[in-house]
């Protein structure tokens, strides 16, 4: 080999960063949305998972809508919050994520919403104490999906003793608050799908 000749490439292959390179199909995060209650209020008594967590006093449900979703991509749901118990004490409350893929925003049993299996979270608290909940789940967006609408339902077994705080309150450390995040992630970027599944409501 003469000094003018370069040795063959024996190191790592060159990874192109341009639009035609190997990263072109692994675009990662496609879109993300967030929501948070704007109205501080007590949660109405609920028996069974039939009542969405409210966003405002009308009540408008706490929800994230992702337009133009692509079937086969992953929908990731992240919900966390704290509820204040103002009852006798020890009352349980549970939450579950639901999603529609046809633009429907009105949850009802036997509607086009699906429950997200493995997204359940809950607990109980004594009077004046907080219940902390965390829901994290991921499902594959099904064929025919157009708009993903994510909401959170709750069931307090009819107690009606829990309250939430919204952005109308000057939030201070320890003040109960709730956030909902939903993300669409490209299928090529998900090397190991989540364990959740969709269940007809």
Image: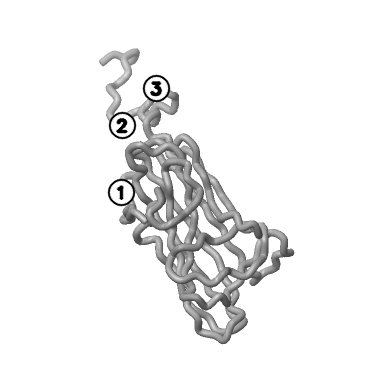
Sequence-first tag of 2 and 3:
2
Alpha carbon distance from label 2 to label 3: 22 Å
- In the image, 152 versus 172, the foreground residue is 152
Q: Are marks 2 and 1 in contact (CB under 8 Å)?
A: no
Q: Which residue is tagged 1?
A: 192
Residue hosting label 2: 11
Can residue 64 be seen?
yes
Determine the residue positioned at 54% across, 46% down. Answer: 33
Residue 47 position within the rendered picture, expressed as x and y whole percent measured from the top left: 46, 71
- The reply to whether the C-beta atoms of the residues labelled 2 and 3 are less than 8 Å apart is no
Is 41 rendered above or below residue 74? below
> Disc 3 designates what residue?
20
Residue at the (46%, 65%) spot, across then down: 95
Q: If the image is split into quadrants, where does the N terminus sit?
A: top left
The structure residue drawn at horizontal position 39% and vertical position 36%, both measured from the top left corner, is 70
Going from N to C along the chain, the mark reached first, 1 or 3, is 3
Residue 22 screen position, x and y as percent: 35, 29
Q: Nearer the viewer, mark 1 or mark 3?
A: 1
In the rendered view, tell whether residue 150 sits above or below residue 147: below
């Amino acid at each position: 080999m003469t000094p003018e000749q370069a040795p063959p490439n024996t190191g790592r292959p060159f990874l192109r960063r341009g639009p035609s390179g190997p990263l072109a199909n692994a675009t990662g995060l496609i879109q993300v949305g967030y929501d948070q209650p704007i109205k501080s209020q007590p949660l109405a008594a609920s028996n069974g998972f039939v009542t969405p967590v409210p966003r405002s006093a009308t009540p408008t449900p706490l929800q994230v809508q992702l337009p133009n979703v692509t079937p086969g991509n992953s929908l990731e749901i992240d919900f966390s919050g704290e509820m204040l118990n103002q009852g006798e004490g020890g009352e349980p409350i549970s939450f579950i994520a639901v999603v529609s893929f046809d633009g429907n925003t009105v949850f009802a049993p036997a509607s086009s919403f699906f429950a997200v299996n493995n997204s359940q979270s809950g607990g109980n608290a004594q009077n004046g104490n907080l219940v902390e909940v965390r829901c994290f789940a991921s499902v594959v967006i099904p064929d025919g999906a157009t708009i993903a609408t994510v909401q959170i339902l709750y069931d307090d077994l009819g107690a009606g003793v829990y309250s939430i705080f919204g952005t109308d309150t000057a939030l201070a450390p320890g003040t109960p608050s709730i956030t909902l995040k939903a993300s669409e992630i490209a299928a090529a970027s998900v090397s190991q799908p989540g364990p959740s599944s969709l269940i007809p409501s």
